[in-house]
């Protein structure tokens, strides 16, 4: 196993562990499930599944052999695309929500939650469908 995979595994383990701490703390503290801190929980869940891809890849022995297995490669690309876009989108939503709350301190942004979900999950779904359906004629590694 190369140093790149070891480093990826260690860093993804930290990310998975950190995400689990955030998610488990929401189980014990009900106040964390309210807006706006619920946005951080959605980000933590997305980060957990995104980092899980790297943790699994770095944990499987001889995982570089899977680069020629197109089905495994496609599955990993689809998984990474969905959760990577979801994670990045939740970061954007948190920034937007923070900006609105700083610009308009008394603005109630909790009513925007359905639109936040529509944006994040919709964008993740659409881009994942694009990745899954648009394939180059030859894989380039």
Image (spheres, rainbow, N blue to C red):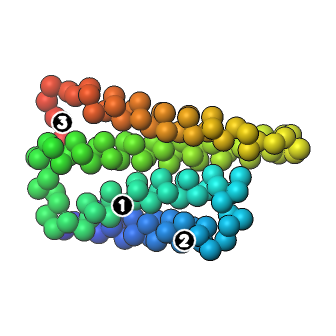
Rounded to the nearest whole Å, what is the CA distance between mark 3 and mark 2? 40 Å
Q: Position of residue 1 (x, y in %)?
A: 19, 68
Residue sitting at 48 percent across and 33 percent down?
123
Q: Is residue 45 above or below residue 125?
A: below
Check disc 3 and report the residue beneath it.
140
Q: Is residue 84 above or below residue 138?
A: below
Q: Nearer the viewer, residue 108 or 18?
A: 108
Q: Of label 3 and label 1, which has the lower sequence position?
A: 1
Q: Residue furthest right?
A: 106
Q: Comparing marks 3 and 2, which lies closer to the viewer?
A: 2
Q: Is residue 137 left or right of residue 91?
A: left
Q: Quadrant of residue 95?
A: top right
Check disc 2 and report the residue beneath it.
24
Q: Nearer the viewer, residue 31 or 21?
A: 31
Q: Quadrant of residue 24?
A: bottom right
Q: Of label 3 and label 2, which has the lower sequence position?
A: 2
Q: Is residue 40 above or below residue 111?
A: below
Tag 1: Cα neighbours inside 10 Å, few (<14), some, or many (≥20)? many
Asked if residue 3 can be seen in this view, the reply is: no
Assess whether mark 1 and mark 3 are in contact (beta carbons under 8 angstroms): no
Rounded to the nearest whole Å, what is the CA distance between mark 2 and mark 1? 17 Å
């Amino acid at each position: 196993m190369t140093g790149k995979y070891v480093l990826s595994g260690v860093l993804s383990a930290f990310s998975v562990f950190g995400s689990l701490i955030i998610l488990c703390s929401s189980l014990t503290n009900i106040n964390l499930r309210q807006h706006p801190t619920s946005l951080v929980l959605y980000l933590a869940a997305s980060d957990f599944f995104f980092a899980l891809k790297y943790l699994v890849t770095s944990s499987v022995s001889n995982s570089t052999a899977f680069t020629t297995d197109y089905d495994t490669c496609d599955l990993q690309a689809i998984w990474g695309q969905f959760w990577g876009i979801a994670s990045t989108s939740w970061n954007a939503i948190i920034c937007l929500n923070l900006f609105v709350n700083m610009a308009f301190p008394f603005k109630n942004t909790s009513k925007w939650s359905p639109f936040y979900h529509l944006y994040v999950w919709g964008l993740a779904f659409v881009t994942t469908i694009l990745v899954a359906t648009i394939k180059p004629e030859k894989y380039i590694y």
